[in-house]
Amino acid sequence: MTTLKVVSDNGTIDTTVPLRQMLQTLNYGVALVNREKFETIFENAKFFQWFPPSAEEEDRLPNRLPDFKAERAVDRIKRGRPYSFECQIKIGARTVPLTIEIKPLAADDEDSPLLVECKDMSKQKEAEYMLASYSEISEKHARELQREKDRVEKLLLNVMPRSVYEEMREYGTSTPQKFECASVLMLDFVNFTEMAVAQDPSALISELNDIFSAFDRIAEMFDCERIKTIGDAYMAVSGVPETTPDHAQNIARLALRMRRYLEKRNAAHPEQWLCRIGINSGPLIGSIVGVQKYVYDIFGPGVNLAARMEAFADPMHITLCEETYNLIDNQFICSPKGEFEVKGFGNLSLYDLEGEIARAR
């Protein structure tokens, strides 16, 4: 009888175990087959349980193993490589995935039988399925997190400039900045509370949303930043938080395009929206305000003076102070409005912005 010497952790024990008996105790299937016809020479109980022979067919591997390719197996074994494949069997109501490997019992003996090893892959497949499920869930959560992050970013960019948002994201805070010269635009509508549309809140919000959305697009065209809206008032700035030497020209173009948009809208709508626009250029401070609700705002006398300019403007006119006029005089058409006493600023010369001087092409 073929025997096997058993070795323990303490060394060799003088005990012999029959090889056939040892193979029968394995928890995976083992069989020996000849090379010519793949006929079974030996098989353990597990192999017999998984692949029982048929009474009607010869006891050969092609008849017992599903998905076994005899020609391919012969080719691989001739080239000194094992032939491996996977299959599934039914044990009762359960489907068991198996991996099967066929190779020579003795690699240096061409006449040796072939060893067939069949292993149950159920636990590995379950682990792979769980890993794939966890990976899919993780990817889903990552996508949801990214969507939420994008939504929050979009909301924050509606209340603060991108550079300020990026500073907040990186450092958790934003440093107030002083700008030596920037231009501010203030706009509100004439007789807003008396307008017929004001009697219908839904229509009012819809119209304001359309108009302010158009203003936002125009502001973006001319590198201006909308700071906030308060009721029917709209505030925009150029030169904050990104400084530019053309801040006065940018804000002037914004004002002219806003007025032109309203003129075209009024020509096509029964409700007339008449605006007053004030512009001022000068030093100001930009900063995030608030702790639980962030708002980016601008402060300083320059902002107050822009509001005063808006108050001096006639309907559908754009009024600016002398400092802004001096910055844009050679590029825009302005008409003197006169000298006025401006609260908090004394007597100032004011101008109305009429249009932009056509550039030679």
Image (cartoon, helix red, strand yellow):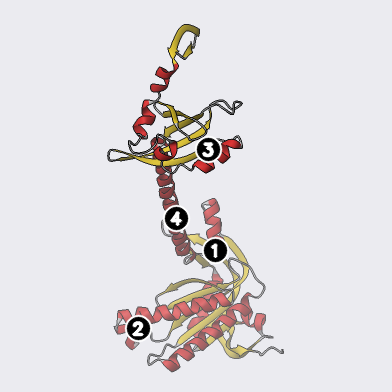
Against 244, residue 341 (above or below) is below
Q: Which mark is residue 143?
A: 4
For badge 1, the amino acid type reads Arg
Dot 2 and dot 4 residues touching (CB under 8 Å): no
Q: Position of residue 43 (x, y in %)?
A: 41, 27
Q: From the image, state whether disc 3 or disc 1 is nearer to you.
A: 3
Q: Position of residue 273 (x, y in %)?
A: 42, 87
User: Which residue is drawn at the image coordinates 42% and 53% (left, top)?
Assistant: 140
Dot 3 and dot 4 residues touching (CB under 8 Å): no
Q: What whole-number distance in Å separates the C-alpha atoms at marks 3 and 4?
A: 42 Å
Mark 2 lies on a secondary structure that is: loop
Quarter of the image for the C terminus: give it: bottom right
Q: Which residue is mark 3?
A: 83
Left or right: 253, with 200 as reference point: right
Quarter of the image for the N terminus: give it: top left
Q: Nearer the viewer, residue 345 or 182?
A: 182
Residue 315 visible here: no
Q: Which residue is mark 2?
A: 193
